[in-house]
Amino acid sequence: MKALVQEKAQAIALRKGGLSYKDILSKIPVAKSTLSAWLIDLPLTSLEKRVLKHRRNKNITRGRIRAASALRERRLLREQIIFQEAKREFAKFAGDSLFQVGLALYWAEGAKRSRQWYFTNSDDDMIVLMVNWVKRFFHLDPKTLSVRLYTHKPFAHENYEEYWAKKIGLPATAFHRTVYKQTGLLIKKRPEYRGCIRISLGPVAYLKKMLFWQQMLVDYYKKVM
């Protein structure tokens, strides 16, 4: 009994010193329910509450730093794996003119700062080339591509989706909802214009690999120039 009285007094002193329940239990081996009963009615001064809050926030911050560090380590490991795979594949495809053309087109027209591989253009031959490029070098079925049409509202009745579906070789049902842009023009400046098509690939790994390949292409030509 005397030992419990001493442990309770010690627990109260530690709590007033700003320690959390977890910290106190590491020093006083009692059940958590016992500790709670000892401290539930403990009145804390404003200073003691501030000390306790500071320690709690400090522990949370440390936990967040550890979690962020772990996430960063996993991300770097994934990127290293993608880089090594990209390096092997670049050595295999570097002499292929289509491979180089696709990298150059994406370098000029593709998204670089997003979380996905995006390529947008109104040139139908260019879009078809990139769809075939994805099939050949990413080894993907074109049906796995995400496709969206961007056009102007006054031309909605022209059904560009059907044109692009035939051109790309995908059913119109594979297209996401068309995005209509507002315009004051009622007559097309370019009669052959049928909107812009954006093709995209979901996992960020495709974008990472594309950017690695682009840098490898730059380094490749620096050596031969």
Image (tube, rainbow, N blue to C red):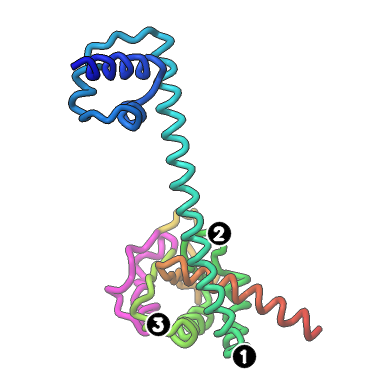
- As measured in the structure, the alpha-carbon distance from the residue carrying label 3 to the one carrying label 1 is 19 Å
Residue at 61 percent across and 83 percent down: it is 101
The quadrant holding residue 30 is top left
- Circle number at residue 140: 3
Span shown in magenta:
151-179
Nearer the observer, 107 or 37: 37
Residue 32, percent across and down?
A: 22, 29
Residue 78, percent across and down?
A: 48, 67
Residue 195 falls within the magenta-colored stretch = no
- As measured in the structure, the alpha-carbon distance from the residue carrying label 1 to the one carrying label 2 is 26 Å
Category of crowding for the residue at label 2, using alpha-carbon neighbours closer than 10 angstroms: few (below 14), some (14–19), many (at least 20): few
Quadrant in which the N terminus appears: top left
Which residue is outermost to the front?
2
Nearer the observer, 167 or 90: 90
Which residue bears the numbered disc 1?
A: 97
**Kind of residue indicated by mark 3:** Leu
* Contact flag, marks 2 and 3 (Cβ < 8 Å): no
**SS for tag 3?**
loop
**Kind of residue indicated by mark 2:** Arg
Which residue bears the numbered disc 2?
A: 113
First of labels 2, 3 by sequence position: 2
Answer left or right for 5 relative to 168.
left
Is 195 drawn above or below residue 115 in the view shown?
A: below
Residue at 40 percent across and 58 percent down: it is 180
- As measured in the structure, the alpha-carbon distance from the residue carrying label 2 to the one carrying label 3 is 23 Å
**SS for tag 2?**
loop
Answer left or right for 33 relative to 146.
left
Residue at 27 percent across and 30 percent down: it is 29
- Circle number at residue 156: none
